[in-house]
Image (cartoon, rainbow, N blue to C red):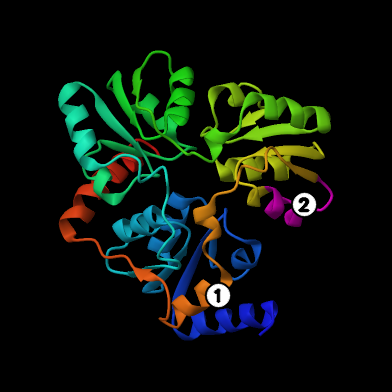
Amino acid sequence: MTLRELQQEIIRLKKEKDICILAHSYVAHEILEIADFTGDSYALSVKAKDAPQKTVIMVGVRFMAETVKILSPEKKVILANAGAGCAMADQMDKQVIEIIKRQYPDYKVVAYINTTAELKTICDVCVTSSSAVKIVKQMPEKNILFIPDCNLGDYVAKQLPEKNIKLLQGGCPVHASVNAEEVVEAKKLHPNALVLVHPECTPDVVKLADYVGSTSGIMDFARKSDAKEFIIGTEISIAEHLQYECPDKMFYYMSPKLICKNMKLSTLGDVYNAILGRAGEEIVLDDETITAARRCIDEMIRLGG
């Protein structure tokens, strides 16, 4: 089959089998074209909750599929590529954070959505990269333990000096791989371009940005901006997607290092085979884990996330 024929067959099969396909913005463009919903991880899990289909295929990484299952426990949730994990989500486990919580009993634990379902079970509040500042600001507590991304946590701390935010060493190794020198070099090559970065980047990179925001925030900013050139400081697929959407504008990679290998594992073929039951992995979480992990997400929603 050609690429177009494979896409058409996937569209036919998902309708026939009543399947909803979710695709994170970091996956390949040909997958976005056949998805029912695209975007950031938490937004996708909300879309899945409201979708009528009883089966959901997540084209992303494991923690994203887990979040879908937490919000839609009655649905069958399949991770398109069983090997697609997340280096950030896997950095901290429940046992380690339980020990740290005992050391800092007066701290509330704020978990970035990029964490495992198991770790969410012992956290107080969940946040996304777009809602983190707002949620932490709304919390009545001053003492905050922010996990796992210390760069996003640093960004939140700088916006909220009235809070006492403790950070642990952890985060996204892809976003953290870029340094300030690379940003300066990119600006020399493209002096008219605005620099748009994700807050998972290091503080010295964030400091050089014209805009800091989530993946969806970066894309929305670029779409709406009157500017014509942009240096994209997040996964390189975003520059590609934006170039498709905005052919009258120019988008440049901040660094060739900004490639998430786990996101690149999922292919159009994986989606096709997952629909046919020949690939992928069903996400199974016990009721106790779902109930406990859901609490920190519900608290985020309560606080306005």
Q: Is residue 16 left or right of residue 101?
A: right
- Residue receiving disc 2: 246
Q: Are marks 1 and 2 in contact (CB under 8 Å)?
A: no
Residue range in magenta is 239-249
Label 2 Cα neighbours within 10 Å, binned few <14 / some 14-19 / many ≥20: some
Residue 243 part of the magenta-drawn span = yes
Tell me which label, 1 or 2, sits earlier in the chain.
2
Question: In what quadrant of the picture does the N terminus appear?
Answer: bottom right
Q: Is residue 53 above or below residue 285?
A: below
Residue type, label 1 = Gly
Q: Amino acid at mark 2?
A: Cys
Quarter assignment of residue 125: top left
Q: How many marks?
A: 2
Q: Quadrant of residue 137?
A: top left
Residue 208 location (% of width, % of height): 66, 23
In the image, residue 16 lies at what x, y percent? 48, 86
- What residue do we see at 31% from left, 39% from top? 92
- Residue located at (20% from left, 48% from top): 292
1 shown above or below 130: below
Task: Confirm whether residue 46 shows in the render.
Answer: yes
User: Percent position (x, y) of residue 266?
Assistant: 52, 64
Instruction: Identify the element where label 1 is drawn.
Output: helix
Q: Position of residue 82 (x, y in %)?
A: 40, 65
**Residue 107 located left or right of residue 236:** left
What residue is drawn where x is 41% and y is 42%? 88
What is the spatial separation of the Cα atoms under label 1 and label 2, in whole angstroms?
A: 27 Å
109 vs 169, left or right, is left
Residue 269 marker = 1
